[in-house]
Image (cartoon, helix red, strand yellow):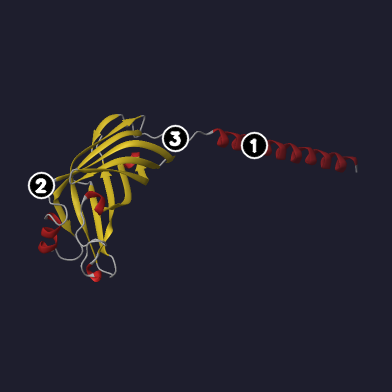
Amino acid sequence: MKRTIILLIFMAVCLFTGCKNEANINSESLLVSKEEVPEKSTANLEGKIAINLEKSVVKWKGSMLFSFGNHFGTVDFKAGSLEFENNEIKDGSFVVDMTTIVNTDGDYSEDLVNHLKNEDFFDVEKFPESKLEFIGFEKVNDNRLKIDANLTVKDVTKPVTLYNVDYFPEERRLSTKFKIDRTEFGINYNSKGFAKVKDYAISDAVELEVEVYFDN
């Protein structure tokens, strides 16, 4: 009987000790997990970096005001660069080649493109370039910025705010969407206040989607 009791006590002590050691191991594992520091970005972006002109693009979209028609297409960058400090954007300037404007909604339309290039719209012979310059930054989170900028179209410069600029340093990519009022830049053709026929009125808002890739 004594041997049985001693054996049971011994087993209980072993069981208790084993559970305690396991708990200590689990606690230590949790402690290590909590102390792990996330890896820092390895992008290593510093100084002035030129954008990749082949990959970067501006997508545009214009719509009718009272009907459901619209056109969309692209225009290419002519030059551009971003200024970095510790992987954060501190400055940026871009030049767009307005002579490269094309439509991508279906087949290429020479009549539409020529109309966009003439004096009714962008008058590219007289104003071949548009420019965007960053002037202020607000960090929303690690991958999103709010950027104030100056936009120049047809030699008219207006302030614009880019509320959602997505920034991916590891991918060397920057993207945003915003709208401008074309009439602020003197583009009044068939706008609400100028269209002779209501159904021919074109929205004053032009949608722009910008994808910028930069080399390092």
Which residue is drawn at the image coordinates 60% and 38% (left, top)? 30
Task: Pick whichever of labels 3 and 2 is earlier in the sequence.
Answer: 3
Kindly state the secondary structure of the residue where label 1 is placed: helix
Badge 2 density bin: few <14, some 14–19, many ≥20, Cα 10 Å: few
Q: In the drawing, what numbered circle is on residue 27?
A: 1
Determine whether, in the image, residue 52 is placed left or right of residue 146: left
Position of 134 relative to 200 (above/below): above
Position of 211 relative to 134 (above/below): below
Determine whether, in the image, residue 112 is placed left or right of residue 192: left
Which residue is drawn at the image coordinates 35% and 33% (left, top)? 87
In terms of depth relative to the viewer, which is nearer, 19 or 174? 174
* Spatial separation of the CA atoms under disc 3 and disc 2: 51 Å
Tell me which corner region of the image, top left, top right, bottom left or bottom right, holds residue 170.
Answer: top left
Task: Pick whichever of labels 2 and 1 is earlier in the sequence.
Answer: 1
* Spatial separation of the CA atoms under disc 1 and disc 3: 23 Å
* Spatial separation of the CA atoms under disc 2 and disc 1: 72 Å
Determine whether, in the image, residue 173 is placed left or right of residue 105: right
Kindly state the secondary structure of the residue where label 2 is placed: loop
In terms of depth relative to the viewer, which is nearer, 111 or 119? 119
Task: Provide the residue designation for mark 3.
Answer: 39
Task: Provide the residue designation for mark 2.
Answer: 126
Can residue 172 be seen? no
Which residue is drawn at the image coordinates 24% and 66% (left, top)? 201
Q: Where is residue 172? Give x, y as percent.
A: 30, 40
In terms of depth relative to the viewer, which is nearer, 27 or 106? 106
Badge 1 density bin: few <14, some 14–19, many ≥20, Cα 10 Å: few
Amino acid identity at mark 2 = Lys
Task: Pick whichever of labels 1 and 3 is earlier in the sequence.
Answer: 1
Q: Quadrant of the N terminus?
A: top right
In terms of depth relative to the viewer, which is nearer, 24 or 205? 205
Q: Where is residue 7? Give x, y as percent.
A: 82, 41
